[in-house]
Amino acid sequence: MDQLTLKHFQHLFSQATQPSVEPETSPTIGDLLLPGGTLTTPGALNVYADGVVARLTEALGETFEAIWWVCGDDDFFQFAKYYIQTHPSSTYNLSNYGEEFPDVLDRMAPFPDLPFLGDLARYEWLFKFLFHTKPHESVSPDSLQSLSEDATIRFHFGSAMRLFTSPYAVYDLWKLRGTEHDGKPPTEWDHSQSLVLYKKDKQIFIREVSDAEYGILLALQQNATLEGALTSAVDAHPSFDQQRIADLFQMMFHTGIIHHIEIEP
């Protein structure tokens, strides 16, 4: 047998302690370990495997706190166990674990009367992402005064800003996480919500926006010109008047979500 490197040993050990992962056949980790005390090699590996499951479950619980709150301990632990078995961790950073958990909840659809679970989990994953994102530099509010009406303008948002929309009021649900409930979420969730999430001064802020405002922000994010985004929004929402457009501009500059303004003469 070729000399075993540390990296190969770590790979074999990781395989042996990951739930539902078939280990490589040659060499096996059992050939390389000497269990202590009265433990057998499988018994020793089970100790580590149980620890892996516990740590991954804890990581999922920290990220998807509102899902845990909605579902309760028993169901959440069952969902976490299934996810861990079907999606082994491939990273040393546990905070990166769980990206596909929302999609798994959608496929499982464990509670037909609670169809929002996947979107709620996506919101929580997005919040976690922003929590670990560095704040970006923002343009000055004075920049708005210097914009020419004849120029072609594009707004480029910073890396610490994200848009989120759902047919369910997941933000209202998320705000209530940790409160007591009798098995049903204590809020009206069966209506849509569109949100702007951004990080500023090391804090994460969430702002609910209207359908017209969300449409403009999304179009700008997708590199539409300012004129094109506003025209499309007014066509789709005739009541979106000049005052509401001015309010939206004020919000964009006040929150600091604009990182760069591209101006073409």
Image (cartoon, rainbow, N blue to C red):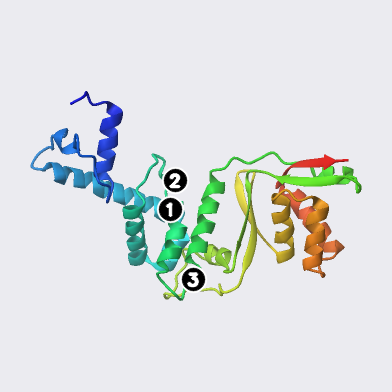
Residue at the farthest top position: 3
Q: Which mark is residue 115?
A: 3
Residue 42 at what x, y percent from top left? Answer: 15, 45
Q: Secondary structure at mark 3?
A: loop
Q: Nearer the viewer, residue 174 or 245?
A: 245
Which one is nearer the viewer's eye here, 190 or 251? 190
| Residue carrying label 2 | 95
Q: Of residues 137 and 107, which is closer to you in this image?
A: 107
**How far across and down, in percent of the image, does residue 12 sit?**
25, 37
Label 1: which secondary element: helix
Q: Residue at x 38, y 67 (%)?
A: 72
- The vertical placement of 14 against 230, above or below, is above
The answer to which of marks 2 and 3 sits earlier in the sequence is 2
For discs 2 and 3, the disc positioned in front in the rendered view:
3
Distance Cα–Cα, label 1 vs label 2: 9 Å
Q: Amino acid at mark 1?
A: Glu
Q: Is residue 19 above or below residue 187?
A: above
Q: Which residue occupies the extreme left position in the image?
A: 38
Asked if the residue under mark 3 is in contact with the one under mark 1, i.e. CB atoms within 8 Å, the reply is: no
Q: x, y percentage for residue 119?
A: 52, 63
Judged by depth in the image, the label closer to the viewer, 1 or 3, is 3
The disc labelled 2 sits on which kind of residue? Answer: Ser
Task: Indicate the secondary structure of the residue bearing disc 2.
Answer: helix
Looking at the image, is mark 1 or mark 2 nearer the viewer?
A: 2
Query: Which residue is drawn at the image coordinates 43% and 53% (left, top)?
Result: 62
Q: Give the left or right position of residue 249, taking residue 19 as reference.
A: right
Question: Residue 198, labelled with which disc?
Answer: none
| Label 2 to label 3: alpha-carbon separation | 26 Å
Q: Are marks 1 and 2 in contact (CB under 8 Å)?
A: yes
